[in-house]
């Protein structure tokens, strides 16, 4: 009887885990219709929103949550307190929120909210609106929410705001009450303290009424270009712009997770076409007015934006070929914000940069349209799949655009090694908002995330890795993949077991350190004693260079991989017995006398994230000459 009860208890406890691993995929859907009327002089606006929410989950919902991001830009907000108490604050924020005046703070104040025509109870709690429903939303059902709200745009500090450092008037991101994501893990009504985002896919129909001398761009396709002018209309259909106080810009976007826009009276608007790809829009200040810059520097910034057009075309062509085709009809590079921040169908980037820096930030933010806005992981929990994958792809693309050689990811490896040596590394599974330091977050998200991919290529081979990246995009575009969904794709493509790699490299801070402890030989053979000095196991590529100039690659798979990567080069390869993870040492037997061996090197391609490369090579010839 006790055995039966124990078996029943185990079954009950493990059932949720099994269900999570074998979940039937579903995702929620939203349809936004919004009208906003902007008071540009006072940096305020009034908004009306109709949101049709479709519950595609198998669960009944009796509560919903909205994000009210602008409320973070107030003294004593969570973002403000976090910035003033973390040991390494973001220099862009510091105590700036704490010192905002009443006309500089941000807020979103909900005036009314109904569900299916009936008023509902709601409460504003920091940057989250908590809504208790009048009637539950059952599986497969829809509910229509109508809201009116007022907002004040904060002085630009982080991502959003008015009057950024380069004088751009409006950088409008996180600007509207946004429904939080509900997925297989439940609701995600995270407070806004400065990190990442998660949202359902949906359609947006947005009308923005603003002073008639402003030029706008952002997410979506402009529906009334001939009314607007400023280069948005076809030349043959050009009409006189109406004179008056305000003008309405009407945008629509389909199947996106967010909506951003920017506006300034001094924007120049340029377009270009990616062959077999999207139409590109560029909005930037002309003349450039970067504060503190010389006239010569501002002239160079304008020239850099002109050159950015061709670089953007080249970047899109490379991305479409290597990481999957961009699915939307257009993309906008818009000057604004506080550095670079991605949004669906476009980005906000600062413009007062050298050409290389401008292209670099454009490429990085562009790739978020692959690794966040199309492959929409929960970047709050899986920030490394967003920033890391983006960093990997952008480093490759920059090398392509500027014809660079060598290990293009070496910077990511150096950053990862630095955080390891500092003792401040935290697991990549840490929620983006909850790292102890900004430095640990940055390295885990950007650097170690990029290393994860480059090292994965080392494990499964270049061809399977490249095919896997394309398959990942095709399988999971317009969805919310998890880390295990990605690993599963790579297992299918390579035929290997890869859960061990995810568990070691992502879920822990265990590190890799292999070395060559000794080399001994006689007239018939040479034995190199290899040692694993740290806890994380890896397969090894070991290249032996002979005194006659020939090279041979000895490949040591891990047993738990249950497979071997294909041959990657023309070099002769010898596959040896598997090295199990429990063995601290391994004897590599080379059937040649030591006198014929010049050197032995572990991983000469430097794709292995070995934290101590000093013991990765052994100069056999020098040893024999001593």
Image (cartoon, rainbow, N blue to C red):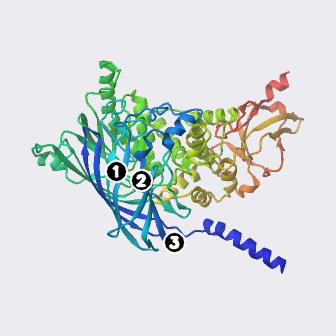
Residue at image point 30% right, 28% down: 302
Residue pictured at 68% horizontal, 53% vertical: 503
Q: Which mark lies nearer to you, 1 or 3?
A: 3
**What SS does tag 1 mark?**
loop
Element marked by disc 2: loop
Indicate left or right for 541 with 88 as reference. Answer: right
Q: Are marks 1 and 2 in contact (CB under 8 Å)?
A: yes
Q: Nearer the viewer, residue 142 or 69?
A: 69
Quarter of the image where one finds residue 596: top right
The residue that disc 1 covers is 277
Label 1 vs label 3: CA separation?
A: 39 Å
> Quick check: 580 above or below 545?
below
Q: Badge 1: how crowded within 10 Å, few (<14), some, or many (20+)?
A: some
The N terminus - image quarter: bottom right
Reading the image, the residue beneath label 2 is: 325
Q: Is residue 500 left or right of residue 133?
A: right
Label 3: which residue?
Answer: 59
Q: Earlier in the sequence, mark 3 or mark 2?
A: 3
Location of the C terminus (image quadrant): top right
Tell me residue 473's x, y (percent): 48, 56
Q: CA distance from mark 1 to mark 2?
A: 8 Å
The answer to the question of whether label 3 and label 2 lie on touching residues, with beta carbons closer than 8 A, is: no
Q: CA distance from mark 3 to mark 2?
A: 34 Å
């Amino acid at each position: 009887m006790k055995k039966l009860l124990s078996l029943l208890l185990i079954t009950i406890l493990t059932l949720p885990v099994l269900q999570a691993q074998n979940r039937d995929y579903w995702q929620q859907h939203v349809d936004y219709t919004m009208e906003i009327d902007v008071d540009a002089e006072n940096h305020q606006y009034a908004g009306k929103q109709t949101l049709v929410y479709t519950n595609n989950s198998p669960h009944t919902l009796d509560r919903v949550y909205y994000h009210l991001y602008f409320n973070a830009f107030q003294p004593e907000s969570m973002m403000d307190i976090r910035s003033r108490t973390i040991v390494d604050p973001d220099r862009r924020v510091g105590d700036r929120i704490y010192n905002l005046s009443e006309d500089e703070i941000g807020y979103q104040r909900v005036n009314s909210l109904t569900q299916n025509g009936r008023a509902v109870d709601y409460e504003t709690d920091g940057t989250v609106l908590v809504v208790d429903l009048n009637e539950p939303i059952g599986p497969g059902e829809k509910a229509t929410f109508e809201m009116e709200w007022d907002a004040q745009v904060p002085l630009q500090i982080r991502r959003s705001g008015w009057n950024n450092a380069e004088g751009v008037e409006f950088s409008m991101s996180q600007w509207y009450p946004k429904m939080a994501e509900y997925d297989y893990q439940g609701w995600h009504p995270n407070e806004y303290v400065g990190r990442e985002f998660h949202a359902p896919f949906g359609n947006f129909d947005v009308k923005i009424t603003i002073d008639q001398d402003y030029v706008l761009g952002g997410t979506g396709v402009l529906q009334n270009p001939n009314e607007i002018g400023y280069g948005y209309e076809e030349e043959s259909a050009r009409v006189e712009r109406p004179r008056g106080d305000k003008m309405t810009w009407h945008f629509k976007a389909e199947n996106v997770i967010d909506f951003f826009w920017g506006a300034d009276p001094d924007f120049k608007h340029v377009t270009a076409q990616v062959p077999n790809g999207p139409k590109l829009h560029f909005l930037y200040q002309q003349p450039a007015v970067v504060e503190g810059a010389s006239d010569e520097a501002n002239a160079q910034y304008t020239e850099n934006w002109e050159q950015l057009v061709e670089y953007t075309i080249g970047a899109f062509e490379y991305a479409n070929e290597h990481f999957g085709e961009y699915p939307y009809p257009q993309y906008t590079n818009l000057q604004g914000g506080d550095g670079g921040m991605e949004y669906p169908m476009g980005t906000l980037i600062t413009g007062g940069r050298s050409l290389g820096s401008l292209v670099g930030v454009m490429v990085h933010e562009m790739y978020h349209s692959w690794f966040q806005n199309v492959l929409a992981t929960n970047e709050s929990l899986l920030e490394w799949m967003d920033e890391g994958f983006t960093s990997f792809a952008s480093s490759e693309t920059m090398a392509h655009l500027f014809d660079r050689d060598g290990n293009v990811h070496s910077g990511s490896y150096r950053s990862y090694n630095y955080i390891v040596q500092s003792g401040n590394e935290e697991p990549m599974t840490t929620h983006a908002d909850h790292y102890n330091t900004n430095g640990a977050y940055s390295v885990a998200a950007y650097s170690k995330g990029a290393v994860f991919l480059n090292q994965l290529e080392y494990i499964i081979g270049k061809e399977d890795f490249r095919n896997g990246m394309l398959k990942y995009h095709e399988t999971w575009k317009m969805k919310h993949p998890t880390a295990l969904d990605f690993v599963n794709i790579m297992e299918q493509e390579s035929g290997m077991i890869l859960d061990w790699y995810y568990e070691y490299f992502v879920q822990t801070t265990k590190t890799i350190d292999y070395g060559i402890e000794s080399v001994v030989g006689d007239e018939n053979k040479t034995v190199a004693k290899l040692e694993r000095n740290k806890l994380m196991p890896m397969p090894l590529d070991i290249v032996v260079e002979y005194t006659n100039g020939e090279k041979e690659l000895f490949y040591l798979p891990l047993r738990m991989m249950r497979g071997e990567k294909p041959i990657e080069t023309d070099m002769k390869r010898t596959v040896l017995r598997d090295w199990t993870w429990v063995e601290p040492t391994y004897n590599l037997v080379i059937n040649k006398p030591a006198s014929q061996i010049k050197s032995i090197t572990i991983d000469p391609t430097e794709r292995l994230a070995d934290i101590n490369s000093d013991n990765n090579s052994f100069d056999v010839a020098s040893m024999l000459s001593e």
